[in-house]
Image: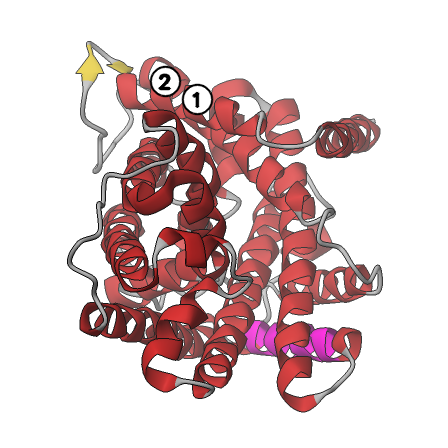
Amino acid sequence: MKKPKLKRELGLFEVTMYGLGIIIGAGVYALIGEGAGIAGNAIWMSFIIGAVIASFTGLSYCELSSMIPKEAAEYNYTKKAFGKRLAFIVGWSLIVANIIGAAAVAMGFGGYFSHIFSTPIIPVAVILIVLLSLLNFWSLKESSHFNIVAATLEMVGLFIIIAIGVLFFRPNVDYFYSPAGITSVLSGTALVFFAFLGFENLANISEETKKARKVIPKAMLLSIAITTILYIAVAAVAVGAVGWEALSSSKAPLSLVMNQALGQNASLVMSIIALFSTSNTVLIMLIAVSRMIYGMASQGSLPKLLGKIHKKRHTPYKAVFLVMITASIMTLVGDIGIVAELTTIGIFAAFIAVNASAIVLRYKLAKARRPFKMPLNIGKFPVLALLGVVTSAAMLFYFKPVIWLAELAILMLGLLIYEWRKK
C-alpha cells in the first residue's frame, strides 16, 4: 500500500493570491497612519524603500525555493547550509512565532466581530481557529478558494480607498515633505516594512504546488510587486485626500479617506474588510505552521506521528490539529498584543538565517540546480543576500529589550529540545 503524500494542486494564480492575502493582511490599514506621523507626506517613499529591502530577502527565498522546493522551507535551507542544530532552532522559532501570530490575529478578528455584533472576543477567536483548521484539514485547494475571495476583498478595499482618494485629491500637496527629511523617511521605512511580511510563507507550500521550482519564485516576486504598487498608491492618495497630520492622529486612518465619500458607512465597510483580512491571515498562518511541523517531523526532527498525511484529504492532519489546539490555548492569554511581537522578531531572525544560507550554499552546493538565481553577484557571491542579512539584522533593533529576552528564551528552549531529542 502506497504511503499517502501531499497533493500538488496549486498553480501560479492560487499561489500568488496566497501571497497577496498574507502580505496585505491588516497591516497597511493600521500602519499607514503611524507611518505618516513619522515620514509626513513622503510616506510613499518609505513604502518604496521598504519594498526594496523586502526584495533582498525575497530574492534569497526565490533562489532557495527553486533549489530546495520543500515544506519547512527555512529549516531545510538552514540544514543544508549550517547543519541540523541551527536548522532545528530556526524551525522551532518560526513554529512558535506563527502559532502566537495566528492566535493574536484571531483575537483581532474577535475584536472586529465584537464591534459589529457585540460578542465576546475570545470564544469568537477560538471558533475561528477551529473552523479554519477544519478547512486546512479538508484540502489546501478549498483553503485557497477562501483565500482568493478574501484576498480579492482586501484588494478591493484598497482600490476603493485609491478611487475615493483620487476624487478628493488636493492638488497643492507637497509629496516630498517630511518632518526631518530623509531621516524621517527612513524611520518610516522601519515601521512600514512590517506591511510586507508574509511572502516567506509561500515557500512552505512548495510540496503542494505544481512546478514549484518555477511557480514559487514567480509568485513571490509578483506578490511583492503588486503589494508595492498598491501601497504606494494608497499612501499617495491618502495624504493627498486628508493630509498626513489627520492620518497620523487617527486610530483608523484609512477610514478617514472612506469617510469622504461613504460617511458613517465607512466604519462598517472597513470592519467587514477587516473580518475577511484577519480571518485570511489566520488561515494562511495555520497552513504555514502546520506544513513547517510536517516538514520537520517527516525528517525526524519532531515526533514522526506529526508527519502523517491523511489518506483521503492528503493533508498533514495531526500537525493541523496540534496547531489548532495550541493556537486556541494561546488566545486564552487574553491581551497578547505585546507577545505578538514575538512573531515578527522570530521572522526577522529566520530571515538572517535564510539570507546567510543563500550565501553559504552558493559555495557548498555550487553545482545544484537553480531555476531562479538572484542577480548582482561578485563571482559566486550574492550581494543582495548580504544586504538581506544586514537589513534583517538592523530590523531586530526595532524591538524592545523584553521581546529580545523572550525570543532568546524561545531559542534556548529550542536548543534544549533538540539536545534532548538527540539523546
| Residue 148 visible here | no
Q: Name the residue furthest top.
A: 379
**Dot 1, crowdedness within 10 Å: few (<14), some or many (≥20)?**
many
Please say whether residue 127 is one of the residues in the magenta stretch. Answer: yes
Q: Quadrant of the C terminus?
A: top right
Going by the numbered disc 2, the residue's amino acid type is: Leu
Q: Please give left or right for residue 91 compared with residue 264 in the image.
A: right
Question: Where is the N terminus found, in terms of image quarters?
Answer: bottom right
- Residues 408 and 89: in front is 408
Badge 2, how many Cα within 10 Å: few under 14, some, many 20+?
Answer: some
Q: What residue lies at 67% left-to-right and 39% top-to-bottom?
A: 92
Residue 386 has which mark? 2
Q: Secondary structure at mark 1?
A: helix
Q: Please check the rendered image and state whether residue 73 is part of the magenta-colored stretch, yes or no.
A: no
Q: The residue under label 1 is which amino acid type? A: Val
Residue 347 spot, x, y in % from top left:
55, 39
Q: Residue 129 location in percent, x, y?
A: 67, 72
51 over 102 or under it: above or below: above
Numbered range of the magenta stretch: 124-137
The overriding secondary structure of the stretch rendered in magenta is helix
Residue named by callout 1: 389
Residue 331: x, y in percent? 78, 64
